[in-house]
Image (cartoon, rainbow, N blue to C red):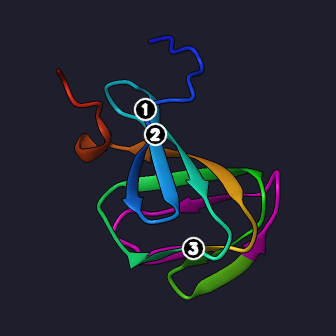
Amino acid sequence: MIRKHSESGYDTPIPGVEQKTLVYGERTLMAEFLLKKGKRVPRHSHSHEQTGYLVRGRIRISIGPEHGDLGPGDSWSIPGNVEHGAEALEDSVALEVFSPVREDYLPKQA
């Protein structure tokens, strides 16, 4: 699958947090997240393994009992079923890969 850049296609799962699925295959899905300064992704868990990379901005992330402030170029990995959350310390852009594919993030068919 090849997908060209587009400014459209974002969902807003949480006010101040936009999410867009970029590409996906049989076992992985990559999504882009735009987080506004001060917005939080509440602690939650899901069965998917999640690996992320911070493109721009600064975030505070918690993974299980571990916490850290991250900047551009930093990355993280979250095992499935581990509680995690984040707070945007600045307007931020993150890329995350999920495995297996998150069915709830697949583009809706028209």
Which residue, as the protein is rendered here, is positioned at the far right?
A: 72
Going by the image, does 88 lie left or right of 96? right
Q: Mark 3 highlights which residue?
A: 39
**Nearest to the observer: residue 45 or residue 39:** 39
Q: What number is the disc on residue 9?
A: 1
**Nearest to the observer: residue 73 or residue 65:** 73
**Number of dots carrying numbers:** 3
> Can you say which quadrant of the picture contains the N terminus?
top left
Q: What is the span of residues highlighted in magenta in the rendered image? A: 69-86
User: Amino acid under label 1?
Assistant: Gly
User: Amino acid under label 2?
Assistant: Lys
Mark-to-mark CA distance, 2 and 3: 17 Å
Q: What number is the disc on residue 20?
A: 2
- Is residue 52 part of the magenta span, yes or no? no
Residue at x 52%, y 63% (from the top left corner): 16
Circles 1 and 2 in contact, beta carbons < 8 Å: yes
